[in-house]
Amino acid sequence: MIEIKNLYKSFGNQQVLKGVNLVINEGEVTAVIGRSGGGKSVLLKHIIRLLKPDSGSIIIKGEDITKLAGKKLDEIRSNIGVVFQGGALFDSMTVYDNVAFPLTEKTKLDKKEIHEKVMEALSDVGLQGMEYKYPAELSGGMRKRVALARALIGHPKIILFDEPTTGLDPILVRSIHKLIRDTQKQYEFTGLIISHEIPEIFEISDRVAMLHDGRIVEVGTPDEIQKSDNIVVKNFIMGIEGC
Ligand SMILES: Nc1ncnc2c1ncn2[C@@H]1O[C@H](COP(=O)(O)OP(=O)(O)O)[C@@H](O)[C@H]1O
Ligand SMILES: [Mg+2]
């Protein structure tokens, strides 16, 4: 579904990605783990072309999106939903308007159709009755749900999550993870989740990839990753700093 090949990216003289290779299988949830500042968000931003690599390619549906522009790029992008780190909700807009935003901006659907879709997405994430609240009036967990509803609204084939549970307590982490997994089954998207949540992320991932020193150093099922002999992976899972 998504094939990342030999991706390189530097900012000034800081090399962040040094030849990332990763295949994200259709219909699966793939987690990317790795230390803070290691380039996980930079990698994700390449997949929606918020960033352009220095070299390498990203193949989505047979097209190298690093080389696309204009309508073709918009078309691929319209099939990708994103839950940004922190949620990135518009504080001055109600929950309803936040969730409706991708449809009001990018489609020609009429008000009634948009209303139906917004209500459906809000119900799917357990936020019925919250449509006239503002983000500031919601708990951290609810804000994450709004961000998920906004990513789901256009029924994209791919959803990218950048640390979707940051700042939540462990019980809420589990409930958001369960919601991601439940909606993934219902909407049948392919998911890429950047995560810090060890070990919780293993419960909802089909595959886990470890990004270290600008490369994917290990990929496997959660079970394989947890039993890995790779010292970098072991240390990271055990929470040893500096890995
Ligand atoms: N637009 C940018 N310009 C310059 N440096 C950046 C930019 N985006 C990210 N970086 C740097 O790239 C490195 C990786 O960042 P990031 O991908 O956000 O890490 P993380 O793995 O925590 O998500 C960091 O050192 C960060 O400062
Ligand atoms: Mg990040």
Image (tube, grey):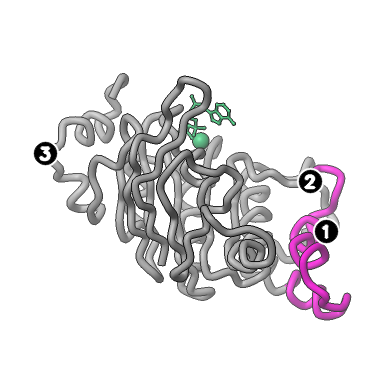
Task: Give the Cα distance between marks 2 and 1.
Answer: 9 Å
Where residue 106 sits: x, y (%)?
77, 66
SS type, badge 2 = loop
The three-letter amino acid code for the residue at tag 3 is Asp
Q: Is residue 150 above or below residue 227?
A: below
Quadrant in which the N terminus appears: bottom left
Residue 90, label in figure: 2
Give the class, few, some or many, for how many residues have Cα within 10 Å of label 2's Cα (few <14, many ≥20).
Answer: some
Give the class, few, some or many, for how many residues have Cα within 10 Å of label 1's Cα (few <14, many ≥20).
Answer: some
SS type, badge 1 = helix
In this view of the protein, which residue sits in the foreground, 4 or 85?
A: 4
SS type, badge 3 = loop
Q: Is residue 225 above or below residue 153?
A: above
The three-letter amino acid code for the residue at tag 1 is Asp
- SS assignment for the magenta stretch, majority: helix
What stretch of residues is rendered in magenta? 90-119
The three-letter amino acid code for the residue at tag 2 is Phe
Residue 106, label in figure: none
Q: Is residue 1 above or below residue 82?
A: below
Where residue 177 sits: x, y (%)?
46, 54
Where residue 194 sits: x, y (%)?
45, 45
Residue under label 1: 97
Magenta segment includes 102: yes
Quick one: label 2 or label 3, which is nearer the N terminus?
A: 2
Q: Residue at x 66, y 63 (%)?
A: 74
Residue under label 3: 229
